[in-house]
Image (cartoon, rainbow, N blue to C red):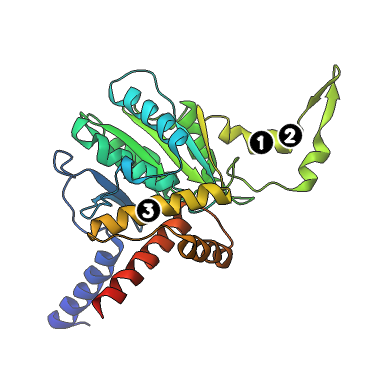
Amino acid sequence: MLTDEELKEQLRRVLASVEQLLPKAVGKVDWSSCRAANWRRHSLAGYLEAITDLDPVTLDDLFGIDQQKQILDENTRQFIQGFPSNNVLLWGTRGTGKSTLVRALLNAYADQGLRVIQVDKDDLVNLADVFAAIKGEAYRFIVLCDDLSFEPGESSYKVLKSALDGAVYAAPENVRFYVTSNRRHLLPEYETDNLGFKMVNNELHAGEGVEEKTSLSDRFGLWVPFHLFTQDQYLDLVGQLVKKHAAEHQISVALDNELFTAAVKWSREKSKRCGRTALQFSRYWVGQQLLKRSN
């Protein structure tokens, strides 16, 4: 038979184990002072965690994607003002500014009531809980799913499809989805997918496999593509970014053949001409000039 002390010790161990299964105690997000939050899953539950350190990027900081900025800016302003607006799929190559553009929009319109909630792919099954957490809030929420793609056999995409379609997991009126992905249809595409096409009344129709893969992306009202730059576009962006970073440090940097030759070499080593590559090179180049002047 256990003594009182042994029984107390067992109870302490049980309580300690149970505590590890419970989410940490957090207060309700104060959206009047918080602009963005992450959905955090913990064991069987989840909660919204306020993001305190936000990327200060602005729309004016983004070069080379003017058309994409205009489309997203107009749709976001429609949403904020309560006009008809769309869920958006931003797709294309990594490093082309998809998620950065969403962050810039938040900074541009946070004072007008825009807020962002980031939800990871594995947490899409908790969308109903996310919606419940912001129910009745007088703000406009973008649910951001960053770098989203699904593999065969994953079922969480059906929850997202349902939310976009206004079915079981229908999103509230003050919520829009902005999803970024490297895949246009969010699912992998194979050469064998084309084998399902058939002719119906002299028209080519996709097979069931392709229809299933496109059924999710079709639910986004706007598809906004982000492509790699041509070399001329890349070098133009490099020039703009170098000038910007040089001005921030109050120095003058020549946009000469030496700079552009180094920029081309940099992009070849990265095997990619995109905004991220241009930004990284401009930081390197301006940093090098500052280092030389400090010696």
Q: Which mark is residue 208?
A: 2
Q: Residue at x 57, y 35 (%)?
A: 216
Residue 201 in the image: x percent, y percent? 85, 16
Q: Nearer the viewer, residue 53 or 201?
A: 53
Q: Which residue is mark 1?
A: 212
Q: Residue at x 44, y 26 (%)?
A: 86
Q: Nearer the viewer, residue 286 or 142?
A: 286
Residue 238 in the image: x percent, y percent? 44, 54
Q: Residue at x 33, y 69 (%)?
A: 289
* Mark 2 secondary-structure assignment: helix
Q: Which mark is residue 241?
A: 3
Of the residues shown, which amino acid type is indicated by label 2?
A: Glu
Corner quadrant of residue 292: bottom left
Check if mark 1's residue and mark 2's residue have beta carbons within 8 Å. Answer: yes
Mark toward the start of the polypeptide (2 vs 3): 2
* Mark 3 secondary-structure assignment: helix
Please say if 190 is above or below 71. below
Q: Nearer the viewer, residue 116 or 132?
A: 116
